Image (cartoon, rainbow, N blue to C red):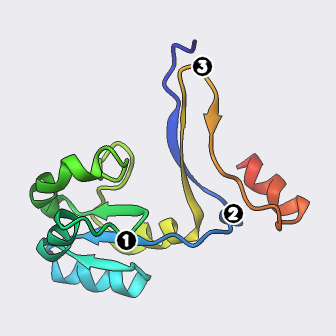
């Protein structure tokens, strides 16, 4: 057993080889546009909450601005067990969504240690060459 909690986020230099769909919850019109420009797949506030309530979860990462957190509380019981609920601790509650969306799309990976102290995280695909895998692993 480990007595330390190892948890974090890292951006891999060569990505994971997988495209990630990102949803951004925000009420701010400027942030909505910035998220769309950065390549977010789903952007909105109340309308996205309604989709989640209806059971349509078509994304793997969720980012939110602080102003959208009260409306996200309505779907916390749906997003939480799936590990999608945004929290400031994990860096998914952001004030500037543009760079955050670009990082999430570029191959940002969340990792955490299990009870035995083993850390699980993807570092690439079999099709990557050895140098790409090595630099991802070293990161």
Residue denoted by label 2: 13
Mark toward the viewer: 3 or 1: 1
Residue denoted by label 3: 116
Residue 65 in the image, given as x and y percentages of width and height: 23, 63
Whole-number angstrom distance, CA of label 2 to CA of label 1: 26 Å
Whole-number angstrom distance, CA of label 3 to CA of label 1: 32 Å
Whole-number angstrom distance, CA of label 3 to CA of label 2: 28 Å
Q: Residue at x 49, y 65 (%)?
A: 104
Residue 52 in the image, given as x and y percentages of width and height: 22, 65
Q: Considering the numbered disc 3 on the image, is that residue within a helix, a strand or a loop? A: loop
Quarter holding the N terminus is top right
Residue denoted by label 1: 58
Q: Considering the numbered disc 1 on the image, is that residue within a helix, a strand or a loop? A: loop
Question: 81 or 107: nearer the eye?
Answer: 81
Q: Considering the numbered disc 2 on the image, is that residue within a helix, a strand or a loop? A: loop
Q: Residue at x 38, y 51 (%)?
A: 91
Left/right of residue 71 with respect to residue 113 in the rendered view: left
Question: 86 or 10: nearer the eye?
Answer: 86
């Amino acid at each position: 057993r480990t007595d330390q909690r190892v948890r974090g986020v890292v951006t891999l230099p060569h990505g994971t080889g997988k495209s990630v769909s990102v949803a951004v919850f925000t009420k701010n019109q400027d942030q909505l546009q910035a998220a769309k420009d950065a390549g977010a797949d789903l952007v909105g506030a109340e309308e996205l909450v309604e989709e989640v309530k209806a059971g349509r979860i078509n994304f793997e990462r969720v980012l939110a601005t602080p102003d959208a957190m009260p409306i996200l509380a309505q779907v916390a019981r749906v997003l939480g067990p799936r590990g999608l609920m945004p929290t400031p601790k994990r860096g998914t509650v952001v004030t500037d969504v543009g760079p955050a969306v670009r990082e999430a799309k570029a191959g940002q990976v969340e990792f955490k240690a299990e009870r035995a102290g083993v850390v699980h995280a993807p570092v690439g695909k079999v099709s990557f060459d050895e140098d790409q895998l090595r630099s991802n692993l070293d990161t």
